Amino acid sequence: MPSHADPRLLVGRESFDDAGIFLLRDDLALVQTLDFFAPIVDDPYEFGQIAAANALSDVFAMGGEPLTAMAIVAFPAGKLPMHVLTDIMRGAQDKVREAGAVLVGGHSIIDEELKFGLSVTGQADPRRLLTNATAVEGDTLVLTKPLGTGLLATAAKAERLDAAGREALHTSMRALNAVASRVALAVGVQCATDVTGFGLLGHASHIARASDVTLRFEGPALPELPGARALWELGTRTGGAERNEAFTAPVADWSRARPADVALALDPQTSGGLLVAVPPAKVAEYLSAVPASVVIGQVERRGNALIVLG
């Protein structure tokens, strides 16, 4: 993609960050992102909620506040009844409203496969951003949601996930990252990213490269959705994880990690949590304020590998 230099573009595509940041005033910046995908759950209303939460997450990952959203719809009009689209839109609107934003419109096309997502515009204080280029040696790495959405969603499609597993999966994917973002700003965090399609290690590699550090993770500490590691050990596989392994392997060292931990760390996430680099003095405060957040590693001086998983 051709680059376009502009001094007002504070965060662009060069660092593979979660959203673009464009300076409007000394105290105000615009945050822009978009995301869409095919359904990973059967219920249209839930799909709308999950797709919206996933798109909104990019704004929260930058320390921003979402303002407006526009729907992106590809709909197989000859295959599905219109009430399916109505329910998807209703789910998305409810989640956008929960985030404090407004769904203002969108664009639709007829397609063979259903796809849905949002383009989201938000605002942020340019003096208090969360980016993937600001991790500092000594920071503690905290993850705010458990991993395993790819594994559980794949098992669900194969009818190998029980009702409790489905509920845990859907609850996690529907949850906004708003609190995790606001607390990060409140305690002085400067570095964060949301964990989505590239998996934990893929998104961590973006932080490591942009910040010129090494990120070290403790495999047994990685939180999982119920049964995620066990599903992998029983043979559940995702194409996304294979692509993530190919992308991450050249810059990572997981030679001492358990295979199931590696699989979890490579699992592609939908509406995953934030990976936050927290100053050591603020870790306890952050953990107490963000339910389900877990310490999973630390930031180290740049070594031979960008990522180490033990």
Image (tube, rainbow, N blue to C red):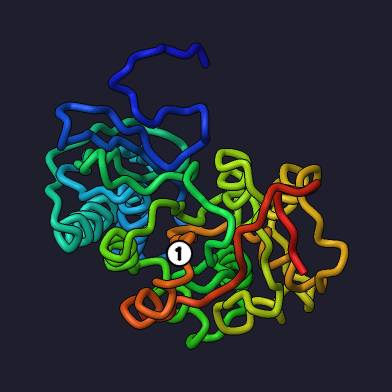
Give the residue at mark 1.
Answer: 279
Residue 176 % position (x, y): 31, 64
Residue sitting nearer the eye, 90 or 285: 285
Quarter of the C terminus within the rendering: bottom right
User: At 35% across and 78% down in the image, what residue appears?
Assistant: 285
Residue 60 % position (x, y): 31, 53
Residue 26 % position (x, y): 17, 31
User: At 68% across and 62% down in the image, what residue appears?
Assistant: 216
Q: Residue furthest right?
A: 255
Q: Is residue 61 above or below residue 282?
A: above
Q: Is residue 286 left or right of residue 275?
A: left
Amino acid at dot 1: Pro
Residue 38 % position (x, y): 46, 48
Q: Secondary structure at mark 1?
A: loop
Residue 49 at least partly seen: no
Residue 200 at least partly seen: yes
Residue sitting nearer the eye, 116 or 19: 19
Q: Is residue 178 above or below residue 89?
A: below
Residue sitting nearer the eye, 4 or 199: 4
User: At 40% across and 12% down in the image, what residue appears?
Assistant: 5
